[in-house]
Amino acid sequence: MISRTRVLVPSGVLGLGFDSEALARAVALSPNVICIDGGSTDSGPYSLGTSTSKYSRAVCVREWRQLMQARAALGIPLIIGSSGTCGSDDMVNWMLDITREIAAETGQDHDAAPLKVALLYTEQNKTNLQEQLAQQRIKPLEPAVPLDQAILDSCTHIVALAGAEHIQAALATGADIIIAGRTTDTAVVSALPLARGCHPGACWHAAKIAECGALCSTHPTSGVIVVDIDDTGFTIYPTADQAHCTPHSVSAHMLYENTDPFILYEPGGHLDVREARYEALDDTRVRVTGSRWIPTQPYTVKLEGARLGGFQTTLLALLRSPRYVANARAWVKRLEGHLHREISASLSLSETAFQLDFRLIGENATLGELETQTSTGHETGVLLIITAETQEMANEIGKLSNPFLLHYPLTDDESLPTFAFPYSPAQTARGPLYEFCLNHILELDEPMSAVRLEEVLV
């Protein structure tokens, strides 16, 4: 039984940034492992749909270099989950390329003691998933969305969210660095303390609180957090100047990206924090006890899939006339009806072949029809998002819409107004639109059956 495992989490995600001085202080505390997340679904389905990272490669290289150097100085494992935002196989290889590049640059690739890197691939084979669907081993989550073999086949990429057991298997190889595909945010943090015999409830709760680095502190942009997990609970604290953890800042993080502030579902079970107690040890550290881990069977992993949903073109116009600003919604309603008639007459498209989505920036651009505020400013931005089956058609609709977005009157018996385009040409081809199409779990007889684990020397 290990009495304590110290985990260093330098940031909520690689590419977001962290305080280098705070990292140095955390390294000086001799942690047992460095863990960082590499992505999420926060920014939508595009990354998974295209198997690309939303983060700057240059920034990721700079930050990963610091973490690789810290790992080398300490001689401990370095783990990244959800590599390259979406965790696809391509993004695992992308992170491996970055690792090779930095190792060569910093001299960590010497022949006498090459870096051992474990690669955890979590992208799923569609044929296998179709078999699992036929065997009713793929179950819907709420809100339930339809799933059949055609939907699975339409996905460009499907990943499974690996759990702590998968990271533990990678750790068991003796790897210096673990590069994982899509994982749950908590899996990378909880894996080592669980393997070392720390309290299961504390491991999972600590992982949930620490997953986003210093977001659980009073100085969230500093990035760096340290969590000590033992056989009864955990203690969490930031290392940046003027950063503090409080019972409020720590307990509130259970609300982050979670539908239930007391229950968190993970592969193999769920975390229950209804009896958790949060105690301020001083003005920086918080002690948490009372968390419970409840194992469940069968073992499941969540599936994420993205597919092509069309192609988009956007236009942006600016209204400054007080009359048009005050009547922007009525103007858009009238304009939308006119555009539908023009598109039908000129392009011979049915109503189902395209979509016009108007967003009034300054009025309802975020919530659309759900907006309840009615305040009016001195100008309004009119964003038109056009979705069609091809980019060529979306562009054609954009060109058709262009003159009307610039000169369309509020009524028939008034002179033509002139609005403003902030740039020329006013329309911008956005390219492919991707959509999430899976909200399901996959039942497994054996956790490792959903992933592939490989080892390479760098």
Image: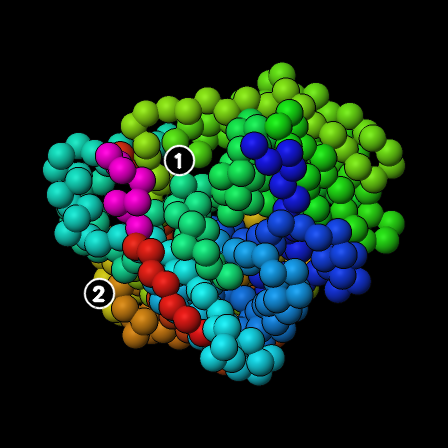
Q: Which mark is residue 267?
A: 1
Image coords of residue 151 (percent x, y)? 21, 48
Residue type, mark 2 in image:
Ser
Which residue in the protein does label 2 denote? 348
The tag earlier along the polypeptide, 2 or 1, is 1
Report the Cα–Cα distance between label 2 and label 1: 50 Å
Depth check: 114 or 41 in front? 114
Q: Is residue 101 left or right of residue 142?
A: right
Q: Judge whether residue 372 can be spotted in this image.
A: no
Disc 1 on helix, strand or loop? Answer: loop
Residue at 71% in and 48% down: 225
Q: Quadrant of the C terminus?
A: bottom left
In this picture the colour scheme is rainbow
Q: Is residue 442 left or right of residue 20?
A: left
Number of numbered discs visible in the structure rendering: 2
Image coords of residue 425 (percent x, y)? 50, 80
Residue at 54% in and 66% down: 55
Depth check: 403 or 252 in front? 252
Residue at 45% in and 66% down: 116
Q: Quadrant of the N terminus?
A: top right
Alpha-carbon neighbours of circle 1 within 10 Å: few (<14), some, or many (≥20)?
A: many
Say which quarter of the image contains residue 93. Answer: bottom left
Residue type, mark 1 in image:
Pro
Q: Is residue 129 left or right of residue 80?
A: left
Residue at 26% in and 52% down: 124
Question: What are the residue bounds of the magenta stretch?
Answer: 444-451
Image coords of residue 52 (percent x, y)? 42, 67
Image coords of residue 359 (percent x, y)? 53, 54
